Image (tube, rainbow, N blue to C red):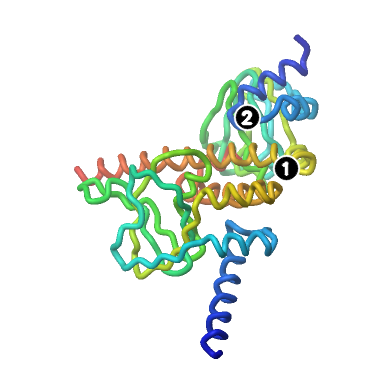
Amino acid sequence: MISQLDDLVAKEKIFSAFKNFPLFQGLPDEVLVVFFVAAQEEIYRSGQVIMKEGDHGQELYIIGDGSVDVCINYEQESKTVLAKLSKNDFFGEMCVIEPSLRSATVVAAETTLLYSLKSTSLNKVYQVWPEQQSTIMTNLAHQLSQRVQKLDDTYFSRAW
Amino acid sequence: MNNLDTMDQCLRKTPLFSWLSTESIAWLAHYTEELSFNQGDTILELGSLSDSLYIIAQGEVTFICGTSQDTDEQQATSLDEMDIFGELSLLEIKPRTSLVRAALPTTLYRLKAETIAQLAQKNQDQHAILITNLSRFLARKIRTLNSKKSILNQATSKE
């Protein structure tokens, strides 16, 4: 009985974490539940590779806890760390925009908990709740615009 | 060809409007304003609210960043025909961080963020397509900037 309660409390906690993900802002609970059920929990140790540059990939990842390094030319002399992402950030989002290969290698920078979501799960949600697609895409565009800002301030002088 | 047809064609050629239906394009074209400027005219002031998307139908515009003193003017970038600017006003309305000036005699097409928001009310599928196009545009921008960063990194590590 107590373990069942613990389980429920844990689920409740994860669900409220889902509510706080910037990617899911403005979504009704019924849609969040679908993502909550569809999401796969994955845990990586520091230094473990989560995705490889050039691979095919159909999942989007949201960081539940921990942090990751986004690198190109990983394991080469010319390795460059492009960004550090942490709790509530997401990566691998290109696959929900257009079919493309992974543009970077992502490595866990510490013990990291991820929620992976297949792009097909998003498509299923759009079939049932087509009106939510523009909400999710707007959230995604917001996050991308913040990333561009970090990389290139001059872009903003014309984009805004 | 009348003006509305020209706008329609111009919107159609803009990647931001790819895959929108003929009806949506026609609807957007109906709400598009045409603005003309002489060479040297100020199009938008620094600090004014950025509340519209602009397509350069003809001419060239320059973005001047930074200070209020003319002597310290910094030319950030310039854009020419068929380029767009103000696209992030579709996400959020913010004060401009640059002064926009016509570098040549210029014709702009202006679409208010408000109009795009109305498209969401009218037809959310179409709005989702447009915002997905914007995300794609931003994602490609990130890729380009990242590969530049990597090349720069290689250049400095070789020194």
Residue B131 placed where, x, y %? 63, 41
Q: Amino acid at mark 1?
A: Gln
Q: Is residue A30 above or below residue B65?
A: below
Q: Quadrant of the C terminus of chain A?
A: top right
Q: Mark 2, chain letter?
A: B
> Does residue A62 appear to the left or right of A125 in the view shown?
left
Q: Please state which of residues B113 and B38 is positioned toward the viewer in this rendering.
A: B113
Q: Please state which of residues A151 and A67 is positioned toward the viewer in this rendering.
A: A67
Q: Please state which of residues A73 and A2 is positioned toward the viewer in this rendering.
A: A2
Give the residue pinned by disc 1.
Answer: B124
Task: Say which residue appears at 36% left-offset and 39% top-offset.
Answer: B148
> Does residue B147 appear to the left or right of B140 in the view shown?
left
Q: Is residue B26 above or below residue B70?
A: above
Q: Mark 1, chain letter?
A: B
Residue most toward the bottom? A2
Res B150 quadrant in image: top left
Residue B155 placed where, x, y %? 25, 40
Per the rendering, the mark at residue B19 is 2
Tag 2, which secondary structure?
A: loop
Task: Say which residue appears at 49% left-offset and 42% top-offset.
Answer: B139
Residue B114 placed where, x, y %? 77, 41
Res A30 quadrant in image: bottom right
Label 1 neighbour load within 10 Å: few <14, some 14-19, many 20+: some
Residue B93 placed where, x, y %? 69, 47
- Asked if labels 1 and 2 share a chain, the reply is yes
Q: Amino acid at mark 2?
A: Trp
Q: Are marks 1 and 2 in contact (CB under 8 Å)?
A: no
Tag 1, which secondary structure?
A: helix
